[in-house]
Image (cartoon, rainbow, N blue to C red):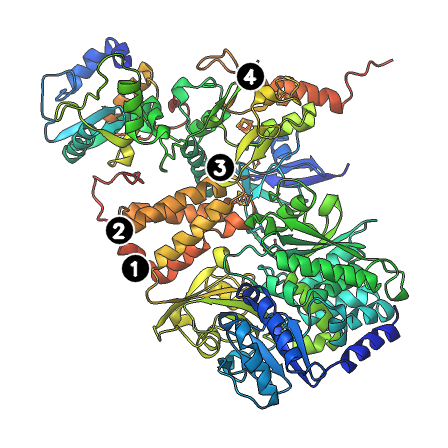
Amino acid sequence: MAAKTLTIDGKQISAFEGATVLQAAEEAGIPIPTLCHLDGVYDIGACRICLVEVEGVAKLLPACTTRVREGMEVRTDTERLRNYRRMILELLFAERNHVCAVCVSNGHCELQTLAYEHGMDHVRYEYRFPKWDLDVTHRLYGMDHNRCILCNRCVRACWHIEGAGTKNVAGRGARAHIISDLNQPWGDSESCTSCGKCVDACPTGALFKKGATAGEMAHNRAKLEFIVTAREKKQWIASE
Amino acid sequence: MVIDDLNAIAEAERAARKKYTLRCCMAAGCHSSNSVAVKKALEQAVKDAGLEDLVEVRGVGCMRLCCQGPLVQVDPDGTLYEKVRPEDSASLVGTLKGGTTHVQKGDPNSPFFTEQLSIVLANSGYIDPERIESYIAADGYRALHDVLREMTPKEVVDEIIKSGLRGRGGAGFPTGLKWGTVAKTESAQKYVICNADEGDPGAFMDRSVLESDPHSILEGMAIAGYAVGANQGFVYVRAEYPLAISRLQNAIKQAKQRGLLGSGIFESPFTFNIDVRIGAGAFVCGEETALMMSVEGKRGTPRPRPPFPAESGLWGCPTLINNVETFANVAPILRKGADWFASIGTEKSKGTKVFALAGKITNTGLIEVPMGTKLRDIVEKMGGGAPDGAPIKAVQTGGPSGGCIPAEALDTPVDYESLASLGSIMGSGGMIVMDDATRMVDVARFFMEFCMDESCGKCVPCRAGTVQMHSLLEKILNREATAADLQRLEELCQMVRDTSLCGLGQTAPNPVLSTLRFFRSEYEELLKKETAHNGEPRAAIR
Amino acid sequence: MSFLDLDEWLVDLAAAVDVVYSPIMDIKEYPENVDVVLVEGAIANEDHVELMHRIRANTKVVVAFGDCAVTGNVTALRNPLGDPENVLQRAYKDAADIAPQYPAEKDIVPRLTPRVTPVHELVKVDLFLPGCPPPAPRIKLFLEQLLAGKGERLAGANIKFG
Ligand SMILES: Cc1cc2nc3c(=O)[nH]c(=O)nc-3n(C[C@H](O)[C@H](O)[C@H](O)COP(=O)(O)O)c2cc1C
Ligand code: SF4
Ligand code: SF4
Ligand code: SF4
Ligand code: FES
């Protein structure tokens, strides 16, 4: 594979052709915040947290879906980007009902962490306080729509790592929400294998293991990574 | 089918013409004001008068002046009858024998008609959209023949490039360039898609073309298929357009029967099939990547570009996607030549544009004018101004992605660049006229509500940002907002425009930004005085 | 309560400031010319609205102190249920065994606002100290900065919700 040289935040780096800006930056130790990105599944560029500026391109581009080009000049940490990121985070907090104090993921939540990193000491937008339900019909897991940020990670994990195809998105705009099968209670889903990969994929406290109380629900991303790496590198096939 | 067969059909069709033709509009506007019954009654009246050998009653497509429908026009003298009722038919037919009628007459020589220049709508109102013979008699499928028998695909692409045709779906991307990219991309399988989603509120240009002249789209798509190397086309139409869908399906069936679609068209090696895909009517499904997801049977949400459809589209194959009106221009360009087309319009915007004229205006309906026509000519001359002579305040173009052009700027020529410089867009052709009773903040709120409801919900800025912008607009309208709220609204506009994934979110702030640009005082008049007692965007106490 | 975890630093604090008003002090009226106020809790009833306006009018630096003041937090859990009537109905009528009635004797119990809001949705707030509760070391840091005259917004590791 051919290598490409580019600069990110003034730092000259090289990356493989076909790598995303996010991968290149990660490789070079330059952090770019992400939310909808999940190692192991394809990217959809939905959360817009990873947007970067590219010299000569008028639009902001998502680092997770933009491929490196030779001579590309990328900026990941400008004032405008930080400002927009904070606004996006505030929009997410205002959109549903995030009550950190009683959330199972308090302290282990990617949304919360990003909010801290971006100096979000309060939300400037009107809280919407929508009414959303809780689905605790599954034997092992629960889904709290109040905390869902529609990153779609659970859907992709369910379809592309587990291959079950249980999780999906229904509705549009602010009424978009995650469903199981044809919008039935999770516990009634016949396709769900109860593998828990969606739960591990979730960045927030929206998907949780039953029995976890406030602050207890840490998601096990390592498990997903292990499976995906093993599959890609065929590590489970015993070598002769 | 060879060229002689095509000529024979055209000849036979022309030979069958009678002394008089009563053209009766059967497009959706007149259709919904009972034109089907009018046509039936006219046929009966002709029979009753014993004039069957002299008079043909022909159902045709849109005759433009929809507000006065059902419309009936008499050939050869061109008398135009408006608001025709079935019970008027006897007296109307009677005029052909020297009788009189009380039916309201329109003036076919009024500027509304004479200022029009028809390329896309040339057949509309003349041919019978349900009969392929009628299209063939109007030189239909001749361009397809000539292209297949006499031109290489590259020559076709070059001709389109030379014509200067730009996409009529909104963004105005050069059509020839797009065709060239798809043609160059190597792939065993390629597709052509006609975007007939037409989701802008108030727009009905594409519907009219499909209802009035469906074969022109099929011919344009087939030519495009030949030029880019595709053998399969799809027309994506919304389910709300049942008449357009049925005419399209009927046209496809007829074209197949005549060998004008299918394999070995005009005895060339070229094969091309077209299928109709019916969308459920989400606005976002007009966005090309969402549309393709929908055609694939998936949830219609946009994805980041690149890759562009021209490289990786339907099922990962190179795909050409153009708007209905874009395709409708193709056959005329190849029939009359790129130079002819390029001689119409302005330097950067060639040809004509169809607009659906609506709002506070005397003549509402469809118009097709050369690019570069002044807005004032459209609104005042052709449209006849506001109904009660009220002053016109602004003209909205581009629907929810567009902007409001103030009356002071009515001398702006209608072309892609001029409209963009005023913060609006050409869009697909909706044109809403507003008089001085219109509150611009209301207009902005209306379009924001539309975008909020139609956001697919995939990306955060659009999904959650439109909700916040909408609530700030409501707060302003309720006189509960402060200058800080207005500032917050402007910040959100910029952010949503700069960070949204697809065109819906990226352009959703346009109606706000453009009304702020020209009518800022209307916002400011609604603001509350700011004191320390005003919090940040305080929830309107409901 | 977390405030009390400040332990002996409270003594230093007491030396540096005059506490002029507190819900647990025997002062009925919020005084004038206050330098700093730490507002705890969300805006949930009409008394809160009135007091908050008085506070804002008479205070230089208004601090939203703790998650309820900053976000609405658990107090705001009633909002998705809509009209406060729904909440009262459930709590005082549906769940009551005997003599179900609202504790709404006029002028005794303040009426609930249509929805619970964070403080900054009602009046301008100068600084925010989230946390449920904000842990003592962070309160100390925050107050120290404030006393030193450089009231700065918190950043990074010093922000924490929940
Ligand atoms: C939200 C959204 C809605 C759109 N709706 C339509 C539509 O209804 N019809 C259309 O032709 N193009 C629509 N477009 C533009 C298409 O994405 C695409 O650019 C167009 O079909 C290309 O055709 P053209 O080059 O012939 O204009 C829409 C774009 C966006 C972002
Ligand atoms: S538990 Fe596994 S199969 Fe079930 S929904 Fe989650 S990811 Fe899909
Ligand atoms: S449930 Fe979790 S993983 Fe799924 S979309 Fe919501 S936040 Fe993302
Ligand atoms: S901008 Fe709006 S419509 Fe487009 S992808 Fe984002 S949420 Fe969907
Ligand atoms: S991580 Fe790139 S858009 Fe979400």
* Circles 4 and 1 in contact, beta carbons < 8 Å: no
Distance from the alpha carbon under mark 2 to that under mark 3: 30 Å
**Label 2: element kind:** loop
Ligand 4 within 8 A of label 3's CB?
A: no
Q: State whether residue A74 is above or below residue B273.
A: above
Which is more foreground, mark 3 or mark 1?
3
Chain name for mark 1: B
Which is more foreground, mark 2 or mark 3?
3
User: Going by the picture, which residue comes out furthest to the front?
Assistant: B48
Tell me the residue that label 1 is attached to.
Answer: B521
Distance from the alpha carbon under mark 2 to that under mark 1: 10 Å
Ligand 2 within 8 A of label 4's CB?
A: yes
The image quadrant where one finds the N terminus of chain A is: top right
* Circles 3 and 1 in contact, beta carbons < 8 Å: no
Residue beneath the point at 81% across and 49% down: B189
Q: Position of residue B304 (x, y in %)?
A: 61, 44
Residue beneath the point at 63% across and 60% down: B173
Assess disc 1: are there few (<14), some (14-19) or many (≥20) residues with their C-alpha within 10 Å of its C-alpha. few
**Label 1: element kind:** helix
Earlier residue among tags 4 and 3: 4
Q: Callout 4, which amino acid?
A: Tyr
Q: Do the residues at pointers 2 and 1 share their chain?
A: yes
Tell me the residue that label 4 is attached to.
Answer: A141
Tell me the residue that label 3 is attached to.
Answer: A175
Earlier residue among tags 2 and 1: 1
